[in-house]
Image (cartoon, rainbow, N blue to C red):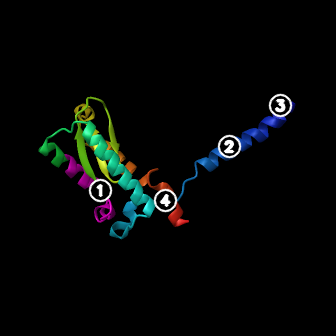
Amino acid sequence: MRRAVYCRPVAVGLIAALAVSCATTNLPPISASGSGFKPLPDETALWEKSRDEEKQLREKVRLYDDPLLDSYLEQVVGRLTPPGMAANREIRYRVRVVEDPTLNAFAYPHGALYVHTGLLARMENEDQLATVLGHEMRTATCCASSAPPRTRRSA
């Protein structure tokens, strides 16, 4: 009986903590500002750091050289890019293909998107490709990489 008295407040506390942790901020994506978006200094520093990391990556991996594939991927990204993001002069999406048999894709905060040949080889249609590219585009522009500085800006 005594255990039930203590379990109820603990359960209520856990539920409250979970509810608070699931709350989201009203953080607009970079594309919401269109051409008027101006990064904060810490965002600019993050993008510069990611460009340096990308440069190091490109020295270590082999890029798949296929101009037709590059053009096709850029077209898919172009169709997925919201108008506000297309007008943004600060960040542009660029897709590159890494010669690697693993199923992987990733993005840098400054808009560089990478897809492995192994993942491309397993895709059955353009919808699957668009899903992967859309996910990486969102990662580059909306998620943890830029949320902390932009959260401070809106406060």
Q: How far is the residue under mark 3 from the one under mark 4? A: 45 Å
What is the tally of numbered marks visible in this picture?
Answer: 4
Q: Residue at x 68, y 43 (%)?
A: 15
N-terminal of the pair, mark 2 or mark 3, is 3
**Gap in Å between the C-alphas at discs 1 and 2?**
38 Å
Who is closer to the viewer here, 149 or 58? Answer: 58
On residue 81, the disc is 1
Q: Which residues are magenta?
A: 73-92
Numbered tag placed on residue 149 in the rendering: 4
Mark number for residue 15? 2
- CA gap between label 4 and label 2 equals 29 Å
Q: CA distance from mark 2 to mark 3?
A: 18 Å
Image: 2 above or below 148: above
- Between label 1 and label 4, give the one nearer the viewer: 4
| Amino acid type, label 2 | Ile
The location of residue 20, given as percent across then percent down, is 63, 50
Quadrant in which residue 42 is drawn: bottom left
Mark 4 or mark 2: which is in front?
Answer: 4
Given residues 16 and 92, the one toward you in this image is 92
Sequence-wise first label, 1 or 2: 2
Task: Report how far apart the C-alphas of labels 1 and 4 lie in the structure.
Answer: 23 Å
Q: Position of residue 111 (x, y in %)?
A: 32, 53
Residue in the foreground of this view, choosing between 135 and 4: 135
Dot 3 corresponds to which residue? 3
What secondary structure is marked by label 4? helix
Residue 155 in the image, given as x and y percentages of width and height: 56, 65
